[in-house]
Amino acid sequence: MTERMVAVIGGSGLYEMPGFQIRKEVEVKTPFGKPSDKIVVGRIDGVSIAFLPRHGRGHHLLPGEINYRANIWALKKLGAEFIIASAACGSLREGIKPGDIVIIDQFIDRTKGRIDTFMGNGIVGHLVFADPVCKCLADVLYKSSKALGIRTHRSGTYVCIEGPSFGTRAESKLYQGWGADVVGMTNITEAKLAREAEICYASIALCTDYDSWRDSCESVNIEEVLEVMRKNNENCQKIIKAAALKLPSRRSCACGEAMKNAVITAPEKIPAQAKKDLKIIVGKYLH
């Protein structure tokens, strides 16, 4: 399949939005194992969309159990040029309230032992990642959200923890001191792999709670979080639909050539299997 697509990674219910016409479910085989689930492919007002439930349908994968490489590789194979990621997060700022949306522009990585690169097994590459999301895509998401009247913050730093437990009160205050705005468990790994795959990536952070930094409040309440998540899901669907219709027909950002000078291994030294596995990732540079 070569048709260009806008990919969406998030909850399994995101594709149940008004106007989304499901065409089929696609099971993509990858060199890195199975993606989280089958990918739901369809259209919204003529725009081709691919939905991938990050934690699998029924939410059965822990953040650390997600096969991030398989997910991004599969979306690249389907022709995705844009990935809109949605994710629940905790707020680290009084001004970012539960129910608010933050369009992320920076990350702090606190994960442990996740595979967050396609490099290795005989091929070395060093990705430039100072600005980890696509500004062009983030701008479209922000403008779409604001036009819908949804309370949205244009920028924010997302600290990504391993999970699955929420952080301690001391950790929450530490992240505040670092300048982080929200805390979550998934997006940084996707962002790194998407950049290596030369796919534009931006994140819609859906705030569900105040994490655990507020001494005057109880720590995270799961029931309350789930209720806010249900409300956030509707807003997220609206933003995705609006943004998908506003994306440019041709990309002008640098994401499409992110790996142009990143691979430093001599082509003749790269094992044949690595070249085969990464053909759709960096194959055009291995001459």
Image: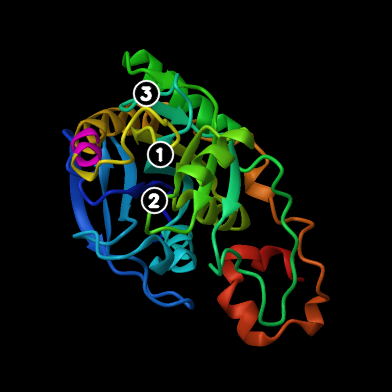
Which secondary structure, mark 3?
A: loop
Q: Residue drawn at (18%, 34%), measured in percent from left and top?
A: 19
Contact, mark 1 vs mark 2 (Cβ under 8 Å): yes
The quadrant holding residue 281 is bottom right
Residue named by callout 2: 166
- Residue 68 in view, yes or no: yes
Q: Residue drawn at (48%, 78%), measured in percent from left and top?
A: 31
Instruction: Determine the CA span between mark 3 and mark 2.
Output: 18 Å
Q: Which label belongs to residue 114?
A: none
Q: Position of residue 240 (x, y in %)?
A: 34, 33
Q: Indicate left or right for 169 with 285 as reference.
A: left
Which secondary structure, mark 1?
A: loop
Badge 3: how crowded within 10 Å, few (<14), some, or many (20+)?
some
Which secondary structure, mark 2?
A: loop
Magenta part of the chain: 224-228
Q: Residue furthest bottom?
A: 272
Residue named by callout 3: 97
- Amino acid carrying label 3: it is Lys
Badge 2: how crowded within 10 Å, few (<14), some, or many (20+)?
some
Looking at the image, residue 28 lies above or below residue 268: above
Q: Residue drawn at (76%, 65%), measured in percent from left and top?
A: 263
Residue named by callout 1: 212
Mark before the other along the chain sequence, 1 or 3:
3
Which of discs 1 and 2 lies nearer the camera? The answer is 1
Residue placed most toward the observer, 173 or 49 = 173
Mark before the other along the chain sequence, 3 or 2:
3
